[in-house]
Image (spheres, grey):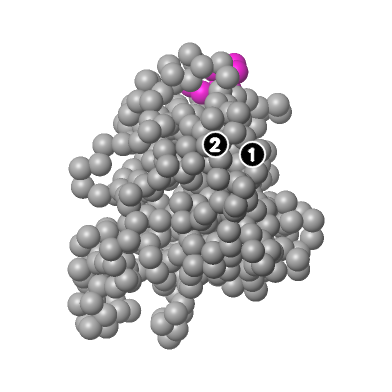
Amino acid sequence: MHHIQKNLYFQNNNKRIKYITDIDKIKQLTPDEKNALRKVSSRYPLRVNNYYLNLINWDDPNDPIRRLVLPHKDELLEWGSLDCSNEKKNTVSNGVQHKYSSTVLLLVSEVCFSLCRYCFRKRLFLKGNKETTNSVEEGLQYIRNHPEVDNVLLTGGDPLTLTTEKLGYIIGQIRRIEHVKVIRIGSKMPSFNPYRILNDDSLVEMLKNYSEQSRRIYLICHFDHPHELTPQSREAVRRIIDAGIICLNQNPIIRGISDSPAVLKKLWKELTYMGVSQYYVFQNRPTIGNASYAVPIVEAYHKIEKAKAACSGLVKRVKYVMSHASGKVEVVGVDSKHIFLKYHQALKDQDTQRLLICQRDDNATWLDQLKPVKGFENKYYSEIIDSFRIN
């Protein structure tokens, strides 16, 4: 009886989910606020739903959920680039990226249920974008032809914006490729709109059917702040886990949202209690419009370490990384003079696990701004930085 009542509660709430793409239709904003933000939202699209807006404390101008989805005037500052990790270089066909030998990315959607203001792929949501694909056939054939690929990441955009039928078709076709053992789905849906999961039993059933004993499906969630862990989102995650899906979480460290050790600690602990392990914490990429969201590497490292120190070993597995054009660079340590980094993954297989030692720079927010220590100015380092530097 309790379960039936719970389902009815979620379904009744789902009927009120509405999407807003016009700043003038957010009734909680004052006319002056709307005027100030209209120019920003005309440059970088706004998309949010009323479920997520209801998480905002409108009496707090610095509310983290508000900062996450509502435009900010500082987005108009000239800073960064649209493709700061040079994903174009790793695009082998429309909607297909192959950067690391064992992993292929399929960009299956150019839509999210809400848009993070700091998004590193905001180029996908701008007019004229053609990076995603409506047909995955070319990507599927590419994967079939590359037996070294043992895992596929469905991303975008958010794959859970697809209909269950279409997503099921894609996953079903991948499951027919014997050498693919892991399918990952990158999604902020459990945070932005958990009703996508709660009110579609066929979605959960489809994922359950394709998450095999030795060939699992992983849902890579994106919770940024404890305020997103509502009863609805917790229930959505529970149903996914109960269906045999492995749930992990990853998020960037963002100024005004997740740059507090107390916030990170609470988020990671609550996720752990739910059965969700924290996977990565990303350095915010130098994407155009993201200046006010960036936290310097040294500051971020110390805050992440302080949060980890208050958590169990289940959380301490988290890695703080930069998704640089040359690879996934882990920040492994900081002392009074140096920043120690390691290629957790690299564009060139032979560079994986290589150590980088750079001069400490408390203002640097990206690898390109760091300088190698004396004695480390070797050809290898120069080639990596110079070849992939985004001007």
Q: Is residue 102 left or right of residue 312?
A: left
Q: Secondary structure at mark 1?
A: loop
Q: Is residue 113 visible?
A: no
> Residue reaching furthest top?
145
Tell me whether the residue at label 1 lies in contact with that at label 2, contact meaning CB atoms closer than 8 angstroms. yes
Q: Is residue 79 visible?
A: yes
Residue at image coords 38%, 25%: 92
Residue 155: x percent and y percent? 45, 40
| Residue under numbered circle 2 | 380
Q: Is residue 177 magenta?
A: yes
Tag count in the figure? 2
| Amino acid type assigned to the residue bearing label 2 in the image | Tyr
Q: Which residues are magenta?
A: 173-180
Of badges 1 and 2, the one in the foreground is 2
Q: What label sits on residue 354 in the rendered view?
A: 1
Query: Residue at image x 60%, y 28%?
Result: 350
